[in-house]
Amino acid sequence: MDAKQNLPQQDTLTALQALLERQTERTDELRRQLRMLSESMKAILENDTQLSEAAVLAEHATKQIKERKKTLTESPEYRQDRVKSVEMKDE
């Protein structure tokens, strides 16, 4: 009787193992496809001339903004206003 009771359990175990194997294979395949899509999207962005040119222009503009801001914050007028602001806050 014990052998008969173990058969359904064994069948269930075998079915679960097969299901897990199929799901693992499916997951691995999906990961592979996602990796390929990710690489493709990255290549599209890296190989776009307009995007590369715009990035260079943006870097240049950012540098110019920083330089101009530094020049303005070092100006006598700005420094004077900053001193006035500190004094007013202290009152």
Image (cartoon, rainbow, N blue to C red):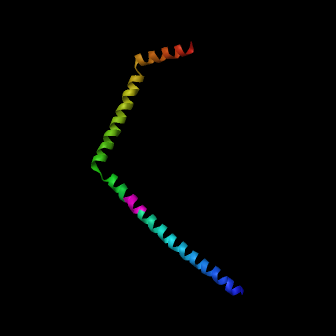
On the image, the x and y values in percent for residue 30 come to 45, 65
Q: How many marks?
A: 0
Q: Is residue 44 magenta?
A: no
User: Is 44 on the left or on the right of 73, as rendered?
Assistant: left
On the image, the x and y values in percent for residue 49 come to 27, 49
**Residue at (48% x, 67% y) in the render:** 27
Q: Would you identify the image quadrant in which residue 64 lies?
A: top left
On the image, the x and y values in percent for residue 33 come to 41, 64
Residue most extreme to the right: 1
Q: Would you identify the image quadrant in which residue 16 lies?
A: bottom right
Q: Quadrant of the N terminus?
A: bottom right
Q: Nearer the viewer, residue 19 or 53?
A: 19
**Residue at (69% x, 87% y) in the render:** 3
Q: Main secondary structure of the magenta part?
A: helix
Q: Quadrant of the C terminus?
A: top right
Residue most extreme to the left: 49
69 over 41 or under it: above or below: above
On the image, the x and y values in percent for residue 14 come to 58, 79
**Residue at (34% x, 39% y) in the render:** 58
Query: What's the magenta region?
Result: 34-39
User: Is 61 on the left or on the right of 8, as rendered?
Assistant: left
Residue most extreme to the top: 91
Q: Is residue 38 magenta?
A: yes
Q: Nearer the viewer, residue 90 or 71?
A: 90
